[in-house]
Image (cartoon, grey):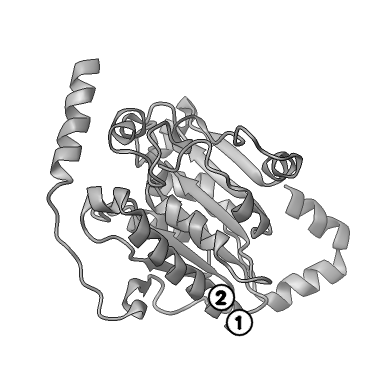
Amino acid sequence: MRTARWLLVMVAFAAAAGGCGRVYKTEADRFVTLTAGKGYDRGMVVCLSGAGGVTGEVDRIRRGLVEGGVECAIEAFEWSSGWILSDQMDITANKEKAGMLARRIERYNREYPDCPIHLIGVSAGTGLVVWAVEDLRPGRRVENVVLVASSLWKEYDLSAALQNVNGRIYNHCSSADMVLAIGVPLVGTVDRKNGISGGLHGFQTPEHATADTHVLYKAKLEQIAWSSRDAACGHIGDHLGGTRPAYVRERIAPLAWAKRPETKVAAAQEAPMTAVAVARN
């Protein structure tokens, strides 16, 4: 059984050497609206695929969010070059693309200053999500960040990103993820460390973390480990199980809520204690 798993992972990474390179004429070509241009006045969710961007994970996430009642705009940031290994390993190109995502967040924030922005990244795409949030200019923030099967190193310092998040970073991890357990240590994490990623057992505070970093991790990082009950939502602990529509509907969509700004203000004025309680939950 263990040998079969090794073979499956090696076949997957061998296939990664192939692919179809993509060419984007303009930066705007990378941002694709998945909700027919609707919902921007309620908020925005930007989704990033894993390396290669060829397994349909963003479309599954969109379906799960819509089924879960998320009514804000949903965009895909098509960051992938179409080549799995280069996506995982080219940190320079990936950080440049993360800068594009940061500028998109800032433009949306200027146009809709009272609307929440949520980011969802898968596997290598989680690296770009975190780097984009780190790169935001002063005064620009996002609401929540969702990481699924992250291939960032487990001790990557998330403190800079956590400071630019109003809510939390939710890290969905699975110790049964064979891609992260075997494949990623072979080729390196997306931030180019030769070790275990945060999507396997969760992120740890860096070895020499400051007291402030420990406080940030405790207050704003929530680790959501896979359990057998998630199989009922189609997630069997595998690498992309966290992108199954049913899992997204039940476990992720409730985090990406969005309401019209005037509704949020009215609700806060009418029942401020209730609003605080909901925010804490």
Measuring from the top left, give residue 196's x and y in whole percent: 42, 31
- Three-letter amino acid code of the residue under disc 1: Arg
- Asked if 230 appears above or below 105 in the picture, the reply is above
Residue 66 appears in the rendering: yes
Q: Is residue 1 visible?
A: no
At x 37% / y 49%, what residue is drawn?
Answer: 124
Q: Which mark is residue 106?
A: 2
Residue found at x 49% / y 48%: 147
In the displayed structure image, the side of residue 268 where residue 28 appears, left or right? left
The Cα atoms of the two marked residues, 2 and 1, are separated by 6 Å
Q: Residue furthest bottom?
A: 111
Q: Which residue is mark 1?
A: 110
Circle 2 packing at 10 Å, graded few (<14), some (14-19), many (20+), is many
Quarter occupied by the N terminus: top left
Q: Left or right: 2 with respect to 121? A: left
Q: Left or right: 245 with respect to 142?
A: left
SS label for mark 1: helix
Numbered label attached to residue 175: none
| Nearer to me, 129 or 94 | 94
Q: Residues within 10 Å of mark 1 (few under 14, many from 20)?
A: few
Q: Residue at x 14, y 47 (%)?
A: 17
Total numbered labels placed on residues in the image:
2
Residue 72 image offset from top left, x and y in percent: 53, 70
Give the percent coordinates (x, y) of residue 12: 19, 38
User: Image point 55% across, 61% down: which residue?
Assistant: 133
Is the residue 251 above or below the residue 47 in the image? above
Q: Secondary structure at mark 2?
A: helix
Foreground pick, 46 / 17: 17
Give, as a three-letter code, the residue at label 2. Answer: Glu
Find residue 132 and report its horizontal and vertical position in percent.
50, 62
**Where is residue 234, by image quadrant?**
top left
User: In the picture provided, is 189 more to the left or to the right than 253?
Assistant: left
